[in-house]
Image: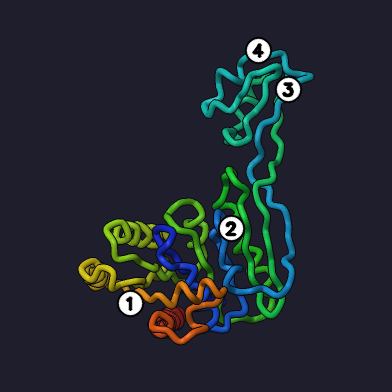
Amino acid sequence: MKQLLILSGKGGTGKTTIASAFIKLAKAKVYADCDVDAPNLHLVMNQSAEAKRSNYYGLPKAVINPKLCVQCDLCLQNCRFDAIQVGLDYQVDDYACEGCGVCESICPVGAIFSKPVLTGELMLYLDDAIFSTAQLRMGSGNSGMLVTEVKKQMRTAAITDHDLAIIDGSPGIGCPVIASISGVDMVLIVAEPSVSGISDMERIIKTAAKFQTRTAICINKFDTNIENTVIIESFCQKFNLPFAGRIPFDPDVVKAINRGQSIVDMDCEAGRATKNIFDKTIKILFQESLG
């Protein structure tokens, strides 16, 4: 099963809009939303079945037993994350604690122990397709680990033969993006023709290169800045990166999203351009795999 990952350097570039269109065009039976901080692919895909939900526990965090604590102050003095709070008792701030274990190791009376903390929820939809996603709890870390579980859940559920899995990744280049890239066959970067968009694109390309992952580029809302669009296309040509195409700014995209539809569910200019990009991307993906 080939895995196509769709990424962008920042939120708001149209990554999920394009991912949902690709899923519809491919009639994909396996897909995932790895933007665990703010998953929204389900809003467009209109799942009919209830999700199978399971709790996700990230790295353990420290807990202080007030009955054993002698208030020696060693944990407070040695916590570099300022996670120890002092009131009537010594307590650990779950949001500040990084689970490093220093306080537990230096406590002279064994009053501190590590406890698994609920940091998110995994969701798996199994109706006419396999859709894996998750929601990270507010203020929780370990988003990269949760992304890994989303992909693992998707692959485990896809026990029968499938040609293609489409993954909607996270914005940026942090841990969730790195976890998203790991193991995929190709990355399609949705670039934005702005100064920050060009910088974001270059950062993702460098990140994907560390994994030796095939990368292609498309530009969304290209006509909002033709000059920067030309810069992106020239960059792709200079570094021999496949350029999948341009998508124009189209007010009908907003109408489709407000209706809970994909842009290929209605006849619009952006939808037609996305169809062309899809055809080219799939050709690149499977030609690369055959080569």
Name the kind of residue labelled 3 in the image.
Ala
Q: Quadrant of the N terminus?
A: bottom right
Tell me what residue is drawn at x 20 percent, y 68 percent: 227
Image coordinates of residue 115 in percent, x first then y, are 71, 37
Compute the Cα span from label 3 to label 2: 33 Å
The residue pinned by badge 2 equals: 148
Q: Is residue 216 above or below residue 175?
A: below
Using residue 33 as the reference point, say whether residue 67 is left or right of it: right
Q: Quadrant of the C terminus?
A: bottom left
Q: Please tell me how crowded label 1 is: few (under 14), some (14-19), or many (20+) other residues with Cα within 10 Å.
A: many
Q: Report if the CB atoms under discs 2 and 1 are less than 8 Å apart.
A: no
For marks 2 and 4, the one nearer the N-term is 4
Q: Report if the CB atoms under discs 1 and 3 are less than 8 Å apart.
A: no
Image coordinates of residue 31 in percent, x first then y, are 59, 72
Residue extending farthest to the right is 67
Compute the Cα span from label 2 to label 4: 40 Å
Name the kind of residue labelled 2 in the image.
Thr
Q: Which label is found at residue 111?
A: 3
Compute the Cα span from label 2 to label 1: 31 Å
The residue pinned by badge 4 equals: 72
